[in-house]
Image (cartoon, rainbow, N blue to C red):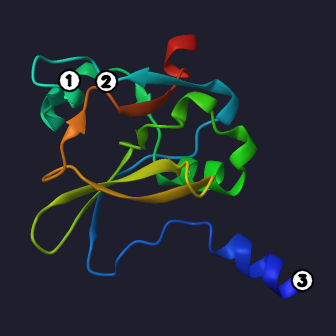
Amino acid sequence: MILDKMRKVEDTDLKVPKEWGLLKDVGLYNINNIFRTHIHKSSSGHILFSDLLKQLSGFDVLGIKNLNYLFANQSLIQEDCKGKETLFLGTIYVDEQNRLWTPKLYYLSFHEEWRNGWFCLSVDRISCHCSIVLISDNILNN
């Protein structure tokens, strides 16, 4: 039973493929100073990654360290994140085909469980309707 608990804790961190290179990674922000930002609407219902980065300029976006912390402490995940892909743009990896990847958190309602995974910024479309980004308000308090 103790071994099962240890294995479960160990398995909560999102695994990074060995072939990927790290482009950007932020530190662990205080989980109490976090709020969400919805992705601004566009006429097509989707937004380009470059436009999203412009909108988030000046904010501290959360990365994989916060995702792993939230995933291990799921009671801290905001209820608003259910039904949406939550992107952690503070961490960006590049794969062997030069595609950009960022961690994501999502909720599978039919399994009633949280999952984490990777969102391809080079291929996947960021939806104005169901994608959000978590940012820290540390910078707003300075």
Q: Position of residue 51 (x, y in %)?
A: 15, 27
**On residue 54, which mark appears?**
1
Q: Tell me if I can see residue 126 in this picture.
A: yes
Residue at x 27%, y 72% (from the top left corner): 20
Residue type indicated by callout 1: Lys
Is 64 left or right of 103, judged from the image as shown?
right
Q: Residue furthest right?
A: 1
User: Is the C terminus in the top left, top right, bottom left or bottom right quadrant?
Assistant: top right
Label 3 SS:
helix
| Viewer-proximal residue among 102 and 130 | 130
Q: Residues within 10 Å of mark 3 (few under 14, many from 20)?
A: few
Q: Is residue 8 above or below residue 115?
A: below
Q: Are marks 2 and 1 in contact (CB under 8 Å)?
A: no
Q: Residue furthest top?
A: 141
Label 1 SS:
helix
Q: Residue 6, located in which quarter of the rendered image?
A: bottom right
Q: Residues within 10 Å of mark 1 (few under 14, many from 20)?
A: few
Disc 2/disc 3 C-alpha distance (Å): 42 Å
Number of numbered callouts drawn = 3
The residue under label 2 is 39
The residue under label 3 is 2
